Amino acid sequence: MVIVIIVQNNVLAPVFRRPFNSEGAAEGEKLLSAALSEIDLVFDNNFFDVALGRGGSEQVIESLQESSAVEGEHQKCCKASNDVKMQAKKWRESKKTKMKLKVYADRMSQPVRAVIIFCKLNGIEYEEVRVDISKLQHLTPEYSEINPMNQLPAIVDGGFKLFESHAILIYLACSYPGIPDHWYPADVRKRSEIHSVLDWHHSNLRRGPGIIYQNTIPVPVLGRIFNPEAVAEGEKFLSASLSKIESFWLKDKGQFLLGGNKPSIADLSLVCDIMQLEVLDETDRDRLLGPYKKVEQWIENTRSAANPHFDEVHKILIKAKEKRQNLLRLKGANNEGGGSAMKKPWLSRI
C-alpha cells in the first residue's frame, strides 16, 4: 500500500493531470521507510542486501535463479512442505512434555479475537498473556522481544515466535492435529481462495471498522477531539468492502465466503473485524450494516458456527460500548441537563 501511495502521488499525478500531492507522497515515503526498517530488524540483513538491490540487479537475478534451482519443481516443493507439516504433527503428538502455546492478546483487538476463538473451537490449549493496548504495553521493550512490529496478536509456541493473525491461524491449522479440514482445506485451490480473501482483507475491509472504532470509542474515553472526516472516510471504506463481499463472495447460496456450509479461517477473520461495529449505537450499526442483508446473514452464520466461544470472546465489546455510552450520557447531563435513553447492545439479544 505504501508504494501505491508514492506512485499515485508522483508518477500517476501528471499522467492523469491531477495536482501533485506533496503531503501524500511524503506520508507514503515515511511509511515505506518505517516498513523497510522493520524488515531489516526482523530478517537477515544479507538477504535484504540482495533483495533490495544493494548488490545490483544482476545479483538479484542470480539469487533468484539459485533459489529456483535449489527448490526444484513446484510439486516437489508442495510435497516437501506437506512432509514437514506431517513431521510437525507427529512430533507434537509424541512429545510428552511440550510447552503450552502462549497467545499475546488484548481482546479489544479484532484479529486477537479471531485467534482466541479458533483455539477455543479446536481444543488448542493455550495461555492468554494480557497485553493492554490502552496502557501501551504493546510498545514495551519486553513485548518488542516477542513482536518487533509491536502489534497484536503474537504467539510463542515452544521456541517459535510468530506475529500477524492470518499467519498465526494458518500455522495453528497446519501444526496442531485434529483441526477440521474446512478451516484451512488441504486442497491447494481452496487454500488459494482463502489466501485471496485474507490478502484482500488487509487492504480493504480491515481499514473501515478500524478507522471508525479509533475515532468513536477512544474519543470520549481518552478525551480526544472527535474527527468527523476520519469517521466518514472509515464508513466509505466499510461500505465499499461490504458491497464487494455481498456482490462477489456471497453472491451464491453458500453460507460462507467460499460457498460451503462450514466456515474457514477467512470467515472468522473478516467477521471478527466487522464485529468491532458493535461498539456503536444500534442506530449507527444498523445504518452501516442494514443495507447488506447477505452480509448480516453471513455474520450470523459464522457466529452460530463458532458459538459458544464467539459470544464469550466478544463480550468485551459490550463493556466497551457501555463505558462509552456512560461517558456520553455524563457529558450530556453536564452540558444539557440529561442524556438520551441507551439502546441495548446487539450481543445482549443473542
Image: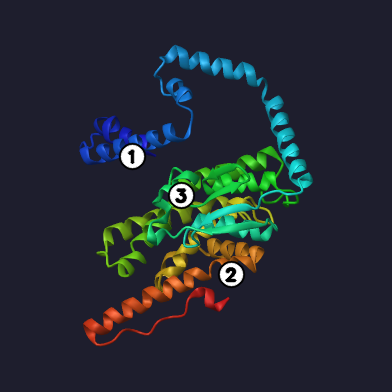
Q: Determine the CA span between mark 1 and mark 2.
A: 36 Å
Q: Is residue 300 left or right of residue 37?
A: right
Q: Amino acid at mark 3?
A: Tyr
Q: Amino acid at mark 2?
A: Glu
Please tell me whether mark 2 or mark 3 is closer to you in this view.
Answer: 3
Residue at x 31% of width, y 70% of height: 220
Residue 161 image-quadrant placement: top right
Disc 1 marks which residue? Answer: 31
Q: Earlier in the sequence, mark 2 or mark 3?
A: 3
Q: Determine the CA span between mark 2 and mark 3.
A: 26 Å
Which label number is shown at residue 312?
Answer: 2
Q: Residues within 10 Å of mark 1 (few under 14, many from 20)?
A: some
Q: Is residue 56 above or below residue 82?
A: above
If the image is split into quadrants, where does the C terminus sit? Answer: bottom right
Disc 3 marks which residue? Answer: 143
Q: Secondary structure at mark 3?
A: helix
Q: Is residue 302 above or below residue 91?
A: below
